Image (cartoon, helix red, strand yellow):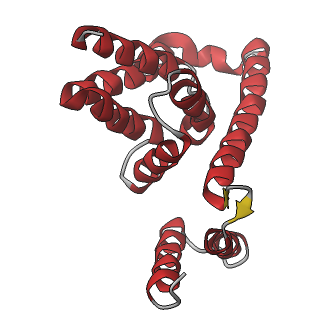
């Protein structure tokens, strides 16, 4: 496959993803997984989880960060540019269209009905992403990973019970992982 063909594939794939990333990054994780792991085979499940982790730990939206990283993995710097442009272009065009005159129509009954369906689908997509990533991170070879599961439970408690900031939760989670590895040896 020629380099130009690979770049075109990258652009078109991320353009398609960009057009259907309703609900933002978290909802889009299910779409990214389906397209990039299951259909394209550009990443394994483990690589996908790593990409999401990297994309989430760097500034910016997960879809853009993922596109940039995956584009680079597949076709270097030019691949990064092409994949990122592909995923960003649809949102730019849609927002431009709304800004240029569609905004008064967003409160019409038909628009509200369409948005109700999109919003319900977004919740489902976020749940599917949670289940897929959770299965990869928390379970290995049909065995629950104890350290990861303990950190998961502690992170949930920090967020829901103690109302901690997400940055604090990430920092505590990293510290717990380091403690488990280098102090407890697990």
Q: Quadrant of the C terminus?
A: bottom right
Between 116 and 54, the one lying in front of the other is: 54
Q: Quadrant of residue 82?
A: top left
Is 34 displayed left or right of 87 in the figure?
A: right
Q: Residue at position x 61%, y 69% from top?
A: 148
Pick the front one: 154 or 97? 154
Residue 172 sits above or below residue 15 on the image: below
Which residue is at the front of the view, 57 or 50? Answer: 50
Which quadrant of the view contains residue 8?
A: top left
Residue 90, percent from left and from top: 45, 17
Which of 1 and 169 lies nearest the eye of the viewer? 1
Q: Position of residue 14 (x, y in %)?
A: 43, 21
Q: Position of residue 65 (x, y in %)?
A: 38, 40
User: In the rendered image, is residue 95 in sight?
Assistant: no
Task: Name which quarter of the figure residue 34 lies in.
Answer: top right
Q: Residue at x 31, y 28 (%)?
A: 74
């Amino acid at each position: 496959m020629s380099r130009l063909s690979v770049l075109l594939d990258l652009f078109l794939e991320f353009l398609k993803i960009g057009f259907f990333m309703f609900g933002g990054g978290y909802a889009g994780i299910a779409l990214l997984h389906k397209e990039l792991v299951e259909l394209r085979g550009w990443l394994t499940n483990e690589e996908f989880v790593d990409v999401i982790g990297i994309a989430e730990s760097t500034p910016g939206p997960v879809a853009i960060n993922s596109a940039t990283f995956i584009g680079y993995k597949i076709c270097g710097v030019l691949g990064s540019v092409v994949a990122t442009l592909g995923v960003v272009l649809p949102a730019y065009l849609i927002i431009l269209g709304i800004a240029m005159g569609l905004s008064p129509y967003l409160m019409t009954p038909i628009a509200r009905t369409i948005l109700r369906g999109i919003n319900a689908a977004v919740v489902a997509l976020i749940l599917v992403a949670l289940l897929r990533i959770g299965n990869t991170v928390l379970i290995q070879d049909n065995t629950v990973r104890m350290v990861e599961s303990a950190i998961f439970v502690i992170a949930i408690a920090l967020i829901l019970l103690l109302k901690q900031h997400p940055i604090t939760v990430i920092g505590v989670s990293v510290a717990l992982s380091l403690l488990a590895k280098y102090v407890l040896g697990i």
